[in-house]
Image (spheres, helix red, strand yellow):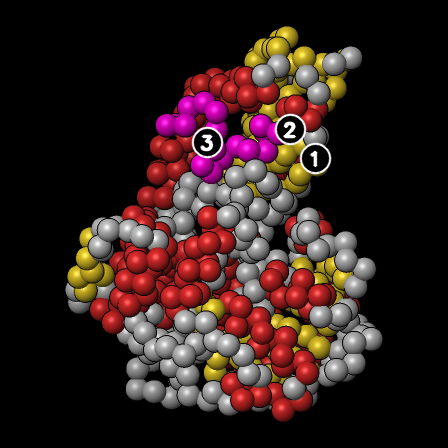
Amino acid sequence: MDKSKPIVVTGGTGYVGARLIPRLLDSGYKVRAVSRSLTKLMSRPWAKNKNLEIVAGDLHDLESITHALKGCSTVYYFVHSMNSNKKDFQSADRVAAKNMVKAAEQNEIERIIYLGGLGNSDKKERLSPHLESRIEVGEILKSGKVPVTILRAAMIIGSGSTSFEILRYLVDRLPLMITPKWVNTPSQPIAIRNVLNYLIGCLDVPETIGKSFDIGGEEIVNYRDLMKIYEEEAKLPQRFVIPVPVFTPWLSSHWIHLITPIPSSMAIPLTEGLKNKVICENQEIRKLIPQELLSCRDAIKKALKRLQMQQVESHWSDAGYSYPPEWVYYGDPEWAGGTIFEDKRKIVLEASKEDVWEPLIKIGGRNGWYQGDWLWKLRGAMDGLIGGVGLKRGRRHDMDLRPGDALDFWRVADLKRNQRLLLVAEMKLPGEAILDSVIEEVGDGKVELKQIARFLPRGLLGLIYWYLVTPFHFIVFNGMLKGIAEETGKKILEGPKKFS
């Protein structure tokens, strides 16, 4: 394949896209990563590669995606609105696919490579909306003039994948599982390593152009089998699985939401799809792109090892980046449409900015919040009960943060080393909230850590919420500032105290 023109990767901040980009770069390709979240892409370790372009583009905006594809040869299509905040993900997927067809034709793109879902809509049993949408997107892409290669996969096993995280948390946390009948539904999982090899291999195999292939591992298993394999590889005591017919997809999804970090908005379409048998039929790609296919056991073993070593390249929670609201930066209550409540506190230390930064970026996840952890856990539990993300997502790495990372029920919106950590709330709220931590030098050998909580209420319920939680701010935020200061081991000169 001609390597002079860039290859476009849409969904470059998502689970598959974020792993494919560095592998394409290592193979000598020029890559154009297209995303709505440039800050998030630029924080990746491969972001400064000379063969990488990072371009803003939104598939729901025809003009922006048409511009983003200019001068490129091939497009990898990994966009799926199920990971966004859009309630009607099927309609959103439809719009995005149609825009891609128009933009690709206008730019004379040579081919599109699409990773879709495995499933057969002509069978007696109707597919779930999630799988129907994946198939429909493929049909829309094929309706244009640009040739499309479709790779259809069932469950993808890899550290940080949605499917693996559901499996991991269920088996880790439940010694006895009363499950739906879908635990016995056959499927053909595939390791993320094999998926990436197929995706890259298509570039050098012209026989894949304009065709559709099913990709899967060697084994046909059910979810119960995978639970048993995970139990053995994680060296857990025996788990007991009892399938019952009364568990509907709706009940299953909310049970998964309570036990795992996966929000109900994603769990519902995923669990609906688990009732469908997903077995490879057209496996011609194995001859065209031969490779060693990992067994389910080997895939789970490698995923566990990555987690233990905290070497997770990408995570399901990376998708769906939350943009900080404009009022965060301008702070104009009238412009924002109402009063912005603030809680501003600070502490002054005899320390350097680096001294304070190190404990600051370790907050959350397994590290905790330095003070009042029980209050954070209580708030997370309450959020989980009403369908929010709660604290179960934790953090990608105990010691490292990047813009766009999930951090318990927050999202890292901005991060400037030794200067600022801005978090946007993703818990269920009657309004919008941020937590802004700023480090400033205030004299020779003196540093001030400011912590500003801002809340833009929505209606009367938002006002009531703010006044209810305000009394706990002294415990949570003062304690957090003091805990960070104590972690530095440096002398506290002033505070913690409120400021205006």
**Which is nearer the eye, 84 or 75?**
75
- Identify whether 94 is placed above or below 425: below
Q: Earlier in the sequence, mark 1 or mark 3?
A: 3
Q: Residue at x 38, y 33 (%)?
A: 377
Disc 1: which residue: 417
List x then y, in percent, for residue 8. 71, 70
Q: Quadrant of the N terminus?
A: bottom right
**Which is nearer the eye, 466 or 338?**
466
Q: Quadrant of the C terminus?
A: top right
Q: Which amino acid does the dot numbered 1 rest on? A: Arg
Left or right: 115 as drawn, with respect to 249: right
Q: How many marks overall?
A: 3
Left or right: 53 as drawn, with respect to 485: right
Q: Which quadrant of the view contains residue 451?
A: top right
> What span is colored magenta in the figure?
358-375
Is label 2 in contact with label 1 (beta carbons under 8 Å)?
A: yes
**Residue count near mark 2 (Cα–Cα under 10 Å), binned few <14, some 14–19, many ≥20:** many
Q: Is 260 colored magenta in this rendering?
A: no
Q: Earlier in the sequence, mark 2 or mark 3?
A: 2
Is label 2 in contact with label 3 (beta carbons under 8 Å)?
A: no
Q: CA distance from mark 2 to mark 3?
A: 16 Å
Disc 3: which residue: 368
List x then y, in percent, for residue 327. 65, 37
Q: Which amino acid does the dot numbered 2 rest on? A: Trp
Secondary structure under the numbered disc 2 in the rendered image: helix
Q: Earlier in the sequence, mark 2 or mark 1?
A: 2
